[in-house]
């Protein structure tokens, strides 16, 4: 059960979100359910976020996975936009003003800032965790650390699941 999040502020909210996600992913859960649940928790816990979800890697392309928010771009080539850059470079990327990012892809015209963390399983890119906000410079250093830890926890959950491996690059 979700805690009463409307009374939780700032850093406490991030810590609470991370704890709830860690508890959820400690269970034996299939990858699709895990990603869906993580996207829902992030969307519920993080303030001023208009999109939270996943893109799955396959053949140098990211394909939209479970998410919360407005309809999203279906496919993103590696190297294009913030998600594609994070996939290609296999590192978290935080952008304070997306319109200034080279090759930015506007899936939602209201998005102003973005945070993307790679999901790496056995040294292979599984996909990325993507968060968008309509507020410029919405994401902090701490947000980046929390989101990367969530991505790492999800990677461990997927790696130990009994489901057949999903697409990895």
Image: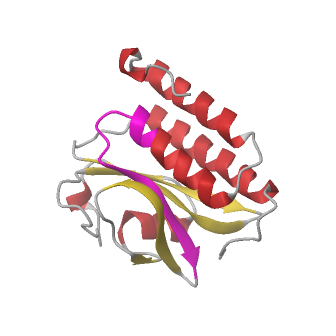
Q: Residue at x 74, y 51 (%)?
A: 156
Question: Nearest the camera: 31 or 84?
Answer: 31
**Region of the chain picked out in magenta, as a range:** 42-58
Position in image of residue 14 (x %, y %): 49, 28
Look at the image and tell me whether residue 131 can be seen.
no
Q: Residue at x 41, y 78 (%)?
A: 75
| As drawn, 163 above or below 74 | above
Left or right: residue 110 versus residue 73 is: left
Q: What sort of colour scheme is used for the picture?
A: secondary structure
Position in image of residue 152 (x %, y %): 66, 48
Residue extending farthest to the top is 7
Left or right: residue 77 versus residue 107 is: right
Left or right: residue 46 versus residue 158 is: left
Question: Nearest the camera: 116 or 24?
Answer: 24
Residue extending farthest to the bottom is 59
Question: Nearest the camera: 81 or 6?
Answer: 6
| As drawn, 114 above or below 164 | above
Position in image of residue 102 (x %, y %): 29, 69
Q: Quadrant of residue 27?
A: top right
Q: Quadrant of the N terminus?
A: top right
Position in image of residue 11 (x %, y %): 46, 21
Left or right: residue 95 versus residue 156 is: left
Residue extending farthest to the front is 1
Residue 153 highlighted magenta (yes or no): no
Residue 44 highlighted magenta (yes or no): yes
Q: Quadrant of residue 99?
A: bottom left
Look at the image and tell me whether residue 56 can be seen.
yes
Q: Quadrant of the C terminus?
A: bottom right
Q: Residue at x 54, y 36 (%)?
A: 146
Q: Residue at x 60, y 31 (%)?
A: 20
Q: How many marks do you count on the picture?
A: 0
Question: Nearest the camera: 12 or 69?
Answer: 69
């Amino acid at each position: 059960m979700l805690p009463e999040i409307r009374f939780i502020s700032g850093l406490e909210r991030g810590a609470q979100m991370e704890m709830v996600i860690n508890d959820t992913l400690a269970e034996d859960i299939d990858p699709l359910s895990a990603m869906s649940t993580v996207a829902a928790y992030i969307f519920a816990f993080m303030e001023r976020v208009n999109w939270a979800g996943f893109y799955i890697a396959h053949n140098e392309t990211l394909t939209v996975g479970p998410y919360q928010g407005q309809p999203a771009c279906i496919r993103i080539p590696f190297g294009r936009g913030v998600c594609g850059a994070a996939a290609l470079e296999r590192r978290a990327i935080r952008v304070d003003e997306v319109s200034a990012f080279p090759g930015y892809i506007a899936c939602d015209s209201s998005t102003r800032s973005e945070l993307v963390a790679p999901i790496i399983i056995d040294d292979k890119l599984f996909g990325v965790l993507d968060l968008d906000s309509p507020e410029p410079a919405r994401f902090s250093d701490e947000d980046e650390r929390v989101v990367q830890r969530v991505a790492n926890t999800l990677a461990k959950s997927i790696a130990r699941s009994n489901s057949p491996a999903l697409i990895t690059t």
